[in-house]
Amino acid sequence: MTPQERLTVLDVPSESSTAQNGASAESPAPVADHTRSGAARRMDVIDLNAGFGSRTIIANINLKVEPKTVTALIGPSGCGKSTLLRCLNAMHSTAKGAFANGEILLDGVDINAKGVDPVLVRRRVGMVFQRPNPFPTMSIYDNVAAGLRLTSGNRHGRHYFDEVVERALRQADLWAEVKDRLHNMGGALSGGQQQRLCIARTLAVEPEVILMDEPCSALDPISTAKIEESIHALREQYTIVIVTHNMQQAARVSQTTAFMTILEAGQPGSLVETGPTSSIFDAPTNEVTGDYVSGRFG
Amino acid sequence: MATLDSLGGGSGSLAPQLRRRHRRNRGMTYLLTLLMAGIGALLIWILSYVAIKGVKAINWGFITDTPPGNPDAAGGGFYNGIIGTFEIVGIATLIALPLGIGCAVYLNQYATGRIAGVLRLVTDVMLGIPTIVTGAFVYALWVVEFGFSGFAGALALALVMVPLIVRATEEMLRLVPGDLKEASLALGVTQSRTIVSVLLPTARAGIITGVMLAVARAMGETAPLLLTALGNDLFVETNPGQRMSTLSLQIFGSATGGFVNAQNRAWAGALLLIAIVLTLTIMARLIARKSAVRR
Amino acid sequence: MSAASHRAETRKAQALHQQRLRFADTAFRWLVAGSATVVLVAFVATAFFLVRKSWPALSHYGVLSFIDSSRWTPSTAVATVSHPNPYGVLQFVYGTVLTSVIAMLLAVPVAVGLALYITDIAPQQLRRPLAYVVDLFAAVPSVVYGFWGIFALLPVLHPIADNLSSWLGGIPVIGGVFAGPFFGPSYFAAGIVLAIMVLPIVTAICREVFAVAPVSEKEAALALGATRWEMLRMSVLKRSTAGIFGASLLGLGRAFGETIAVTMLIGNSVLSITTSIFGQGATMPSVIANEFTEATEPFHLQSLFVVGTLLLIITLIVNVLGKLVVSRISETIA
């Protein structure tokens, strides 16, 4: 089977998976084309080099992301953390001249192989961006349901996705604030609420991995705290990789931390050290890691 | 892989859906590409049709002779129209250029708040006035008193050109960096001198582009001239105080007559007119591109 | 000359020089203010003279009588009779609106498609040349469009029109709109050429509107697993409806005012209103162009000025509305 075929096999109706391992109690029964397959997935990056045109941004990246954990990606600006993240959900290839060589395994299936449909990859690996980007002309409800509408078509009535929307908004800790105004415009919320809306939107399609690119950097401390709480709760169902500038945040939310940096000027970014969060911060093995986490640079 | 097998087999209900979505995506891409190609083909059709019909009928005589007295007779040309076009558009440019640039300078450098808003609105609105209405206005203003004349036609065309020149010049002036003006003023140069010697020359390429496009537009106009210059199919008239013909008027008159020979002359005229207008338009764009790149 | 008196001379010369500079500066300022005034006055004068020239007819027949009659028969006009009004302009309004609506129905979808292609689908290097190609349509003079329309387009339209009238002509109620026979010059033909003529302006504005769709929203759609077309629908088209509407208004204004190409293709029949799009008629600009220089009947010329004034008002309203819509969009985005 080609990687593409194997990736398609991952798309199974939730009934069969619920019948098999009874895991996803969250999937609403009527939406048969829901792809919740049960277990959150692991990701493995093997010898990844990526960049644009003749510029290599990151090189020799090897990373293991365990299922149902939060992995934080830390490092100074410009070292390629976002590039790495965007490779994980095939968003990197949307840029002109982008290349990515190496293996990126989603539960053993190489999603970076030739012929793999990026649309399929992005359904299973969701992303929350740095600046909240809800669709301004859609209501809160429609924003959350946007991803679902793509797969089950627009022919369904307004309330077809009610259960899913509620679940996603609850998981993003936004339900209480918006439940009475679901049909107001998505753009009319505060920054923190918008970001949680984007998280709900990502959760609605039930990906197996969630990527977050500095999701709180544009938000106030209270919204940041709320989102970090959600991440704690989401960990039980999803695999999460979060890029963050904020080392305290990395220490708060993650179990594993990976430190990236540019070791020499002009070189591409590399993954210097990966390990349990506590050891990275308290007792890193690499000297450069130690310098960064103690604030000596970055 | 063990994990995959344990999930059960078969492509889920998603796969055919996904294929459908990709098909739709491909289909729309093809459709839009086809649309673009079709529009390109339409342009080629229009231009080549005129070119082919025109080339068959054009010769030196066309450019140097006036139309024959009998419209059904072969031969002859649009010499008087060609002269008329250049003369009327020339006079129109002489009127519109200082007016347009002056107005734009005032708008950009001197006008504030309310006045600027009103002026900008007016010039924008003037862009949208049908040219036949402009012709009717000049008729009521001038022709009633002084009769049909090339000058009246020039007035009408100037009114069409002014808003175009104002908008182009104003946009160009807005692009000139503010520090240039400040540096000049700091040196003690007066505002007017600054505008004339520093700002306008900097914006020169864009202004020239705007003027060329306005001239191209004026050359193609027929409607306002019907009511002002009226046309003169008989002989060459160089006195702008008298009725004059233009290329556009002659094409219009000869095309709708029903006489084949007149229509042939009209095709030659159409070819010539399009050639002049397209050359001006393309040259203007090239000048704009070149100056933008240099900056 | 002593040093002191030399200095005094220089100072005097400098003072004179400064005075001259200030004078030139003020003169320049007055000059440009003057040209701005001339432009403003020209605009106001246009409206003023149009109304003034139409006033005799308006006061003779009464304003309303012009717009509630579709009969335009200058030959029956008698100077002393003021009722009924032989100069009913309704059919010209009808012709203008019908041809413009046909034009917009064709041009807007095509313009949206072209703009979408140019901003989001075409390869990067082709984008500017393709935009130029569409803009080039605007450079072709109106009289050439009319001429080409008569000889190149009408023969092509003939079979299409015949088919349309035989398929749709029999349907009750709307069949009348497509009733044959098709002779060539018609609302239909004029509408099609109008569509080609307004295409560049509608496409250009749509291009601008689509180009400001934020990349972050496009990425959001892609990250949810949308195909490119789905992304364009969600993040570009959906938020551009107001802009497309504004572009259509501005195109409509242009279509209303187009004279020569329309008059060459519409048949110039001022007899009555025909409901079929294959029928012949006239528009406000076309009747002015056609009858102006031969308007010798009583109140004929003045009535043509009434038509002109009406045309001016309608075009101004549509253009100002369109500008408002489009500028409001750029504000909310910026």
Image (cartoon, rainbow, N blue to C red):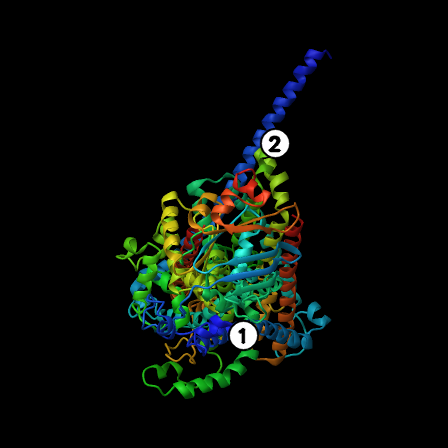
Q: Where is residue A51 in the image (x, y as percent from the top left)?
A: 61, 57
Task: Please name whichever residue, C245 or C279, is drawn nearer the observer in this view of the structure.
Answer: C245
Report how many numbered discs are placed on residues in the image.
2
Residue ID for mark 2: B189
Between the residue at mark 2 and the residue at mark 1, the CA separation in whole angstroms equals 59 Å
Residue ID for mark 1: B30
Q: Which of marks 2 and 1 is in front?
A: 1
Q: Which mark is residue A220?
A: none
User: Residues at badges 2 and 1 in contact (C-beta under 8 Å)?
Assistant: no
For marks 2 and 1, the one nearer the N-term is 1
Q: What is the three-letter code of the residue carrying label 1?
A: Tyr
Q: Is the residue C208 above or below the residue C178 in the image? A: above
Task: Tell me what residue is drawn at x 43 percent, y 81 percent.
Answer: C278
In the rendered view, does C92 fall on the left or right side of A183? right
Q: What is the three-letter code of the residue carrying label 2?
A: Val
Looking at the image, the residue that sits furthest to the left is A180
What subunit carries mark 1? B
Image quadrant of residue B264?
Answer: bottom right
Q: Position of residue A150 (x, y in %)?
A: 41, 69
Task: Please name whichever residue, C290 or A119, is drawn nearer the observer in this view of the structure.
Answer: A119
Packing grade of label 1 (10 A; few <14, some 14-19, many >=20) is few
Q: Is the residue A144 above or below the residue B100 in the image? A: below
Q: Position of residue A41 (x, y in %)?
A: 46, 64
What subunit carries mark 2? B
Q: Where is residue B161 in the image (x, y as percent from the top left)?
A: 55, 55
Task: Please name whichever residue, A19 or B145, is drawn nearer the observer in this view of the structure.
Answer: A19
